[in-house]
Amino acid sequence: MCHFRKIMQPELPFSSRRSPVVCLNGCVASSQTLASVIGLDILRRGGNAADAAVAVAAALGVTEPCSTGVGGDCFCLFYDARTGQVRGLNGSGRSPRALTLDLLSGLGFSEAQPPSVFHALNVTVPGAAACWCDTVQLFGSKKLTLGEVLEPAAELAERGFPVAEITAHDWARWSKALKDDGKALGGDFLINNQPPKHGQLFANPTLARTYQELARSGKSGFYEGRIAEAIVDVVGQNDGVMTLDDLKNHSSTEVQPVFTDYKGVRLWECPPNGQGIAALIALNILEHFPMKEMGHNTSGYLHVLTEAFKLSLADVIHFCADPEKVKVPVEGLLSKAYAGQRAQLINMQTAGVNEHGAPPGSDTVYFAVVDVEGNACSFVNSTYLGFGTGLVPENCGFSLHNRGANFSLDGSHGNCVGPEKRPYHTIVPALLTDAVSGRLLCCYGVMGAFMQPQGHVQVLLNMLEFGMNPQKALDAPRIYVYYDKTDGQWKLSVEAGVEQGVAEELGRRGHAVVGPVSGHQRARFGRGQVIAVGCWWDPDASEAETDARVLWAGSDPRADGCALGY
């Protein structure tokens, strides 16, 4: 089945040609130019990749609040150049103690009829503030204080900035989505009750004060006192159940990242409750197919890619949950033998149904930073859907996320809603190292809800199998595979740029093809950032080009940002 037709959207043409950014001393790639500038300034002042990442996260909370902010969650992967070790930090929050399946059932909610995604019951504890503090403390240079790291973003919020084009579109779109659901976006994010336009100046002085309070008092400045009380008040006023104790008891978790090896490289992801294992499962399956020989974005290539994504997502949706509450069979899901069994389910001529197997035993911002010492910080921060719930604690300048919307209300599911529990999480950073030496190859990621692990795989294959530099790897048209609960079908979104004949052939093989997707709807394919170390993807590169001191960076044209280096 093929619905390959023009989806009429305002055009967002990729009219400019971008070369990859090449530099020596440090690099930042993010979805907002002003945030990239702030991160680069932190590096110039002696901060390392972790310091700069937190500065960028805070700046993005100012310039792109329709995607991210201190009222959301974040995850971090840090490559320590001195030891070669990859470390992870889970900065996702937990549900309130009072949030139980019985409570939701008593309110008339069920798996078939859950609360609105914008309901205050979907507010889990915002984990970003603690994760920012912990990232600086655990991985930072110790040359800059938390206050010095947050100061540029606070100044940006205080004095204001011109809103970027794609951000202005998303700001208006998510404001309308809240209004259509009977909710209202907090006034801190409106000008004369309207979302700001492209190029219009917008300031958020109350967010500046929040950042200053976090800088002065650390985590207690957010999870206790004025800000915590404002969070509890606005959630309670909108029929949520969060308490001061829920906030006070929050902590980030240092985690052991998980990985798989594919053709000489090692891809690192954060473990569950994040969905990063979906990328690893898919790579293990793809190892059984001659991807390069099939040709980039041919019908055979995209068919196998789609089937591998369906198999990996079916497993992850079924098994991924909070490992502190339920057993998640990560080792079995990532075993090469299990991947071999799953690969045998792929029929080269026909799309499969692709249910989960039996293994043995999600709007967001992503950004990447590599510093002069070779440390790398892969970081993702999110309020989930747009402004999240749209609830803005009084005089705080940020909105509260709606990450709890990813809980299941099926009592038999491992991801079922429960007290003090982390939900299935879509945001996932990635790192790539040499499978033998452990040398850093790439700090990268692709934001975009359930697209993220699919973006990780597609960008990696673009570089490793087809020799694309970071910018070309991000520019290339992508696909997005998702399960549509409304009709019980797997759907395949195809971005404009994929040949029409290819899409038609995929339809003949039984895929429910939607596209070509163009304009602002390209957002569904995610927005990525890549910083690579040396020109490792090009087998014909000269010795000078493969110099491991040279950083090569790209920034996704589907976003407003850029990569900057020095």
Image (cartoon, helix red, strand yellow):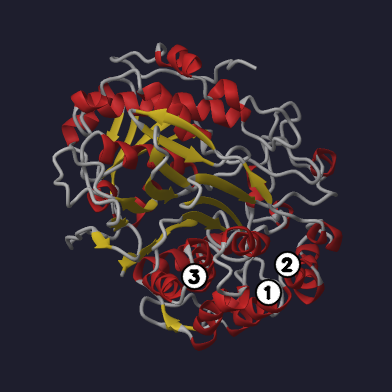
Is disc 3 in contact with disc 2, using a CB cutoff of under 8 Å?
no
x and y percent of residue 76 in the render?
A: 55, 52
x and y percent of residue 388 in the render?
A: 60, 59
Above or below: residue 336 compared with residue 185: above
Query: Which callout, 3 or 2, points at the residue further toward the start of the chain?
Result: 3
Image quarter of the N terminus? top left
Above or below: residue 500 compared with residue 134: above
Please identify, in this view, whether the residue under mark 3 or under mark 2 is nearer the observer.
3
Please identify, in this view, whether the residue under mark 3 or under mark 1 is nearer the observer.
3
Residue at (48, 45) in percent of width and height: 84
- Residue 123 in which image quadrant: bottom right
Amino acid at the residue labelled 2 = Lys
Residue at (34, 30) in percent of width and height: 264
| Alpha-carbon span between mark 1 and mark 2 | 6 Å
| Alpha-carbon span between mark 3 and mark 2 | 21 Å
- State the residue position of label 1: 214
- State the residue position of label 3: 47
Query: Which callout, 3 or 1, points at the residue further toward the start of the chain?
Result: 3
Mark 3, secondary structure of its residue: loop
Judging depth in this view, the residue of 78 and 470 nearest the camera is 78
The label shown at residue 219 is 2
